[in-house]
Image: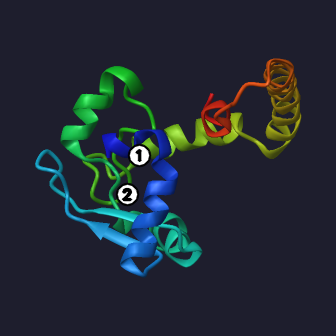
């Protein structure tokens, strides 16, 4: 994975092509007890995130402890659904708070402002490269 970090998404897509499938289930790492599912199939994504959400526990206890310093105790590290210690009550509370913050109208307004601002920065970087006749790594720029 580290070898392909700079081209992570291309590398993941190659794994789908190599497996001749839109979904790849990999064994877990030593510190993760559950297998990892990688998919680019819209039907599988809908199945996991909507139709059968409570069947797929995203919270790995070891990973959560590692990430807790970074992510705190918010929606990204707490358990959800019937298998959670609190039956998902904390996750539901976090989800309701997030739903009020991340509305369609706020994304429309903020997204266009942020996109315009970053496009101006990208434009100036491209102008400089053109003046200097230098080569640019567009993928690197897009990830910034």
**Residue occupying image coordinates x 86% and y 19%:** 131
- Position of residue 101 relative to residue 26, above or below, is above
Q: In the image, residue 13 lies at what x, y percent?
A: 49, 63
Q: Is residue 41 above or below residue 121?
A: below
Depth check: 52 or 138 in front? 138
Does the CB distance between marks 2 and 1 fall below 8 Å?
no
Residue at image coords 38%, 50%: 88
Residue lying furthest left in this view?
Answer: 30
Of residue 110 and residue 37, the one placed in the foreground of this image is: 37
Circle number at residue 81? 2
Considering every residue shown, the one lying at the far front of the view is: 133
Q: Residues within 10 Å of mark 2 (few under 14, many from 20)?
A: some
Q: Is label 2 in a helix, a strand or a loop?
A: loop
- Asked if residue 31 lies left or right of residue 141, the reply is left
Q: Earlier in the sequence, mark 2 or mark 1?
A: 2
Furthest residue toward bottom: 20
How many residues crowd mark 1 within 10 Å: few (<14), some (14–19), many (20+)?
some
| Distance between the alpha carbons at the discs numbered 2 and 1 | 8 Å
Provide residue 84's location: percent of width, then percent of height.
29, 51
Q: Quadrant of the C terminus?
A: top right
The numbered mark at residue 89 is: 1
- How far across and how far down the image is residue 98, in percent? 61, 37
Question: Which quadrant of the structure image shows residue 53?
Answer: bottom left
Task: Give the residue drawn at x 88%, y 29%.
Answer: 116
* Residue occupying the point 38% across, 51% down: 80
């Amino acid at each position: 994975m580290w070898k392909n970090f700079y081209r992570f998404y291309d590398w993941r897509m190659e794994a789908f092509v190599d497996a001749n499938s839109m979904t790849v289930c990999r064994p877990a790492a030593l510190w993760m007890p559950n297998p990892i599912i990688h998919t680019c199939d819209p039907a599988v994504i809908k199945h996991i995130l909507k139709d059968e959400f409570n069947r797929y526990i995203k919270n790995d206890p070891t990973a959560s402890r590692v990430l807790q310093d970074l992510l705190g105790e918010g929606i990204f590290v707490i358990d959800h659904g019937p298998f959670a210690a609190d039956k998902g009550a904390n996750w539901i509370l976090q989800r309701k708070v997030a739903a009020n913050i991340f509305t369609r109208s706020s994304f429309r307004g903020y997204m266009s402002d942020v996109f315009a601002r970053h496009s101006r920065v990208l434009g100036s970087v491209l102008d400089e490269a053109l003046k200097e006749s230098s080569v640019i790594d567009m993928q690197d720029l897009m990830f910034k």
